[in-house]
Amino acid sequence: MVAVREAKLSELLPDERNANQGTERGRYMLDHSLRQYGAGRSILVDKSGRIIAGNKTVEVAADVGLEDILVVQTDGTKMVVVQRVDLDLQEGDAARLLAYADNRSSEVNLDWDADQIHFDLDVGLDLAGLFLPGELDGIRETQLSEVGSGSDGRGERLTSEGLIRPAISISEIAIVERAIYLVGERNRGKAVVQICRAYLERFGEEGQLDVPEEGFAAPEFTFGA
């Protein structure tokens, strides 16, 4: 027997390591589609309610007020079909336009995060079956060129949202991501605060670490979950 329950959108947890950054235009299309045609495609979550697929849709759904959800529990052996009883592909334009909106918004709202992809590769995630040879390098090169063209002159990049993003190497990104992971805090901002607090408690606020030219071993902090 299939288990179905009513819940609230706010109960779902975002994937903090989602490799799709999304786009401003894609978000606009999602907003228009949800307001004009309502919900269509289902959201995929893990056993804890953390979103596997549909992170951007959930963000926009919250903005437009689609708070009520139906959760269908499955082990992956059966397809979950969402039936819109108010739409008919043979009558009117709404169902056909929703089909276009679904495909087009998915296409436009995809913007790979090269930093996250390379972190996942560094920790052993096998993406070979999803990307052709050279595609991952293309994603990295595109992002590096954006860093060069959008730099504010201090080794940092201003994103489209006006946030400052440090321009650091892939290996350095892996170190940062590993530290955030070890903290065990779902909120990445809070994780960074914990890392900074641990540093200050150990070294104080006077001066900086003397870094030898050959590099140094990172301090061995112990983080709580």
Image (cartoon, rainbow, N blue to C red):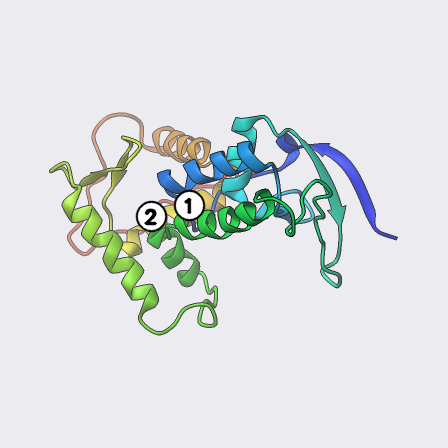
x%, y% of residue 80?
72, 54
Kind of residue indicated by mark 1: Ala
Closer mark to the observer between disc 2 and disc 1: 1
Which quadrant is home to the C terminus? top right
Q: Residue at x 36, y 38 (%)?
A: 24
> Can residue 224 be seen from the camera position used here?
no
**Among the two numbered marks 2 and 1 on one chain, the one whose residue lies closer to the N terminus:** 1
Instruction: Check whether the beta carbons of the residues at disc 2 and disc 1 lie within 8 A of each other.
Output: yes
Q: Is 204 situated left or right of 125 in this image?
A: left
Amino acid beneath label 2: Ala
Residue 106 x/y as whole percent: 47, 50
Question: From what the image shows, is residue 77 above or below residue 19?
Answer: below
Q: Can you see residue 33? A: yes
| Residue 224 or residue 53, whichever sits in front | 53
Residue occupying the point 77% across, 35% down: 6
Q: Which residue is mark 2?
A: 218
Residue 65 % position (x, y): 59, 26
Q: At 37% across and 40% down in the image, what residue appears?
A: 25
At mark 2, the secondary structure is: loop
The quadrant where residue 37 appears: top right
Q: CA distance from mark 2 to mark 1?
A: 10 Å
Q: Which residue is tagged 1?
A: 179
Q: Is residue 187 left or right of residue 13?
A: left
Q: Which residue is situated farthest in the left direction here? A: 153
Task: Give the side of residue 169 with respect to residue 73, left or right.
Answer: left
Q: Position of residue 52 (x, y in %)?
A: 57, 50
